[in-house]
Image (cartoon, rainbow, N blue to C red):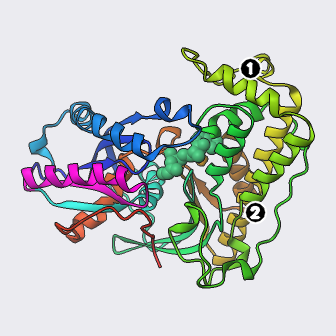
Amino acid sequence: MSGRGLILGIETSCDETAAAVVERGTRTLSSVVASQIKTHARYGGVVPELASREHLRAIVPVMRAALEEAGIALGDLDAIAVTAGPGLAGALLVGITYAKALAAALTLPLIAVNHLEGHIHAVLLQSLPDGRSSFEEEAALALVVSGGHTHLYLARQEKGAWSYRLMGRTVDDAAGEAFDKVAKLLGFGYPGGPWIDALARYGNPQAVPFAFAQIKAKAHLAGKVPRTKAAKTTPIAGLDPRFMFSFSGIKTAVLRYVELHGLREEARARAARLFAPGAEARLPQSKEEALALCPQNVIDLVASFQCAVVGDLMKKSFAASESLGARRILVTGGVAANRELRGRFGAEAARRGVRVDFPTLAMSTDNAAMIAAAAWGRFLAGEFAKDSLSADPSMALGG
Ligand code: KG4
Ligand code: ZN
């Protein structure tokens, strides 16, 4: 123990094995992420059994690299923080078991962190310089938008402790899931978000008119059984329909368009090319490279899809911030890396005179610095995990 407030964060909830050292919840000394993208790419999504196996392989070297990069030894740590959920059960268990063993061997406290709270802290970590706590007593609207989640929270810090109130969420697919599914359907690589992002800038976003229907109150009556992984983490009763999302419709609309315009075969051929043994799938860097990958009508389709999704995320987030009186919006999670989303949220926030913050690109997707940062308040409050800590795949955040 160094007394410097050094927390080792461990994150294994999905397909990244990550470890990081953060000092006093604000200063990132290291953040190491081993991505499993290559393992899962050919399946167009994360294969849970493969994810657990890869975490087992990577966890020790990743943890060692995090200590080395931070220039510290195990004996300097003051606590271990680990993601307890939501996520894949087997994947979470690898991190939890390892963190428990490490904490026991070093006689350090163990702190369980909710992955979604981690994503929110990925922004706070960036926007709060050392030691400052300007968030105190100020409510912020947090949009967590990733491959597994599309959730709106009202986040508030009081006397150092953060609390979260769920205000809205998706009733079916997460936004990132829609990016991944549409990319797969069109024969692009995995994860799909970066492909769509890279292609969309060369397309006409008005080419295909996608529309989002207003979610009806009926769709989120108490007791309705959620059907998708994104819908499983929290109950949906009592939420304002204006702040609810649905992304399965637009995915089906893209599928219809593909069938109607005979784009299926061309997409199949592209996937076969991109995933051929030895092929190195590379994101297009210019209009020429985009056109070498797919025809202009596919680029226009991708641009229209992205424009519609970003528009819907914006509309509901700004409506929620206005209705709740939150002058500050935090946008986080993998989809927050999207270029169009950052540009349009930024412009709209400036127009309305509210503040919007994003994590850096590296901190948008899964990492462990956000887990160590989120653990700091718990460390100060002495809220430590019990010996019985286990994975909670559908762990909810806030009330
Ligand atoms: O936060 P994250 O790393 O993992 C989850 O907790 O889900 O988010 C991954 C998701 C994937 O669905 C991926 O396609 C999406 O974030 N994503 C993007 C971009 N980069 C990653 N979506 C849109 N545009 C991007 N640039
Ligand atoms: Zn995540």
Q: Is residue 241 above or below residue 291?
A: below
Q: Mark 1 or mark 2, which has the lower sequence index? A: 1
Judged left or right of residue 9, residue 206 is right
Q: Residue at x 30, y 54 (%)?
A: 93
Q: Position of residue 19 (x, y in %)?
A: 30, 42
Q: Amino acid at mark 1?
A: Ser
- Label 2 crowd bin: few (<14), some (14–19), many (20+), radius 10 Å: some
Is ligand 1 less than 8 Å from the beta carbon at label 1? no
**Front-lying residue, 299 or 231:** 231
Task: Specify whether residue 86 is painted magenta.
Answer: yes
Name the secondary structure under disc 1: loop
Looking at the image, in which quadrant does ligand 1 appear?
Answer: top right
- Label 1 crowd bin: few (<14), some (14–19), many (20+), radius 10 Å: few
Rendered image quadrant of residue 183: top right
Q: Position of residue 154 (x, y in %)?
A: 54, 72
Name the secondary structure under disc 2: helix
Judged left or right of residue 309, residue 327 is left
Cα distance in 3D space between marks 1 and 2: 30 Å
Rendered image quadrant of residue 225: bottom right
Rendered image quadrant of residue 202: top right
Residue to which mark 2 is pinned: 315
Dominant secondary-structure state across the stretch colored magenta = helix
Asked whether the viewer can see residue 359, the reply is no
The magenta segment is 78-107
Residue to which mark 1 is pinned: 286
Q: Position of residue 94 (x, y in %)?
A: 28, 49
